[in-house]
Image: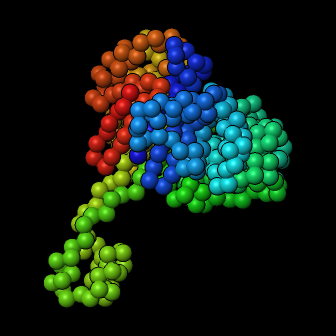
Amino acid sequence: MQIHILGTSSSRPAHGRSVSGSVINTNKGAIIVDCGEGFQERIFNHNKKLKLQKSNFRIKFGKINTILLTHGHLDHTWGLLPFLKTLSLDGRNLPITVIAPTSHDIINKLTSSKNPFTEITDLEPSNVDLCFQYRQWWSLGGTTDALNFQVNWILIGVDENDEIGKLNAILLDPDNNNVQPVDNLKNYTNEVEIMNVPTLHSVPSCGWWIKEDDKKGKFNSELAEKNNLNKIQIKKLANGEDIENHSSKYYRESGILGPSVLISGDTAGENMGFQNFSKTNYKTSLLIHEATFLEENIDRANQYLHSTAIQAAQNAKLINANNLVITHYSSRIKDTSNLISEASNEFDMVHAASDYDIINLTFDDIEIIS
């Protein structure tokens, strides 16, 4: 798994940093997490540099199958439609899925009406709610019919107190005025395992946990030979099937857990989403967490439901992450060394991301290429 950090600034570009957007290369395709303005140009410039460096970690547009948004603020979303239009101009014919959070009330109302355009202003959503943005993008040519490739528009209901792993999601079809429930996100992500983790912000928001498949342990062929098993029996056991008097789990050594990343999006430092996640059995190789402010500005962080570097580190410790990368810096932050210093008092493995960093996660290690 390789994570390409293509923006580390909050709200607006500052000090040579662009707004939010990342690309995650997995074994089953690439996933975009957030897509602020200018995102497609950043991918182009990043790839150009990587090509000159003859890097193996380039971003291939044809491999991108999913776009995940953490919330509706425009520094995280406003580059999406131009990116989709470029894919269309380039002749894309593969489907792509867009998944974004909204409130449970909106999900329930759309589900009840079965109409993606049903009136929702009585629910008093924010004017940047992703439900509204979806409709704006559709009106500007963001539909399957207009783009000439399939777009799966999915909204998920989120609330800070949600049970981790519980899904309340719908698939919106603006071309046919249809709304369908979604039971399993993997059906729309080329089987990449993803999960939303509710966060606390001024609009419905979530982090995204993304995981590679586990590596299977070695098959014990000596035990199979000792038990006089034939080729058909061995094949079934190797594929995880039990046969008479033989359980497949006894014929394979322990596997290795696949690498995973949790990207927080914008969030208050103290939130129930991370508390609830910490009580599960989900493991996290890497937490990428916003660190908008230094501790001296914690009052501003609390006011705007953002995090300090120390709070990011505390959340990394809380969920027992192996590594922490901080990002999403306020324009007040010119030098990230103070953020690192503060976070390191709470958590050992801290890196302050820069635009165009590549984080290479393997089954047992992490490499950061600046």
Q: Residue 125, can we see it? A: yes
Residue at horizontal 68%, vertical 59%?
181
> In the displayed structure, does residue 340 sit left or right of residue 329?
left
Q: Residue 271, can we see it? A: no
Residue at horizontal 36%, vertical 75%?
239
Residue at horizontal 71%, vertical 53%?
149
> In the displayed structure, does residue 60 sit left or right of residue 93?
left
> In the displayed structure, does residue 99 sit left or right of residue 312?
right
- Image coordinates of residue 303 in percent, x first then y, are 56, 19
Q: Nearer the viewer, residue 219 or 104?
A: 219
Residue at horizontal 24%, vertical 87%?
229
The answer to whether residue 260 is above or below residue 268 is below
The answer to whether residue 308 is above or below residue 88 is above
Image label count? 0
- Image coordinates of residue 306 in percent, x first then y, are 52, 24
- Image coordinates of residue 272 in percent, x first then y, are 49, 38
Quadrant the C terminus occupies: top left
* Color theme of the render: rainbow
- Image coordinates of residue 319 in percent, x first then y, are 37, 40
Q: Nearer the viewer, residue 215 or 118?
A: 215
Q: Nearer the viewer, residue 126 or 172?
A: 172
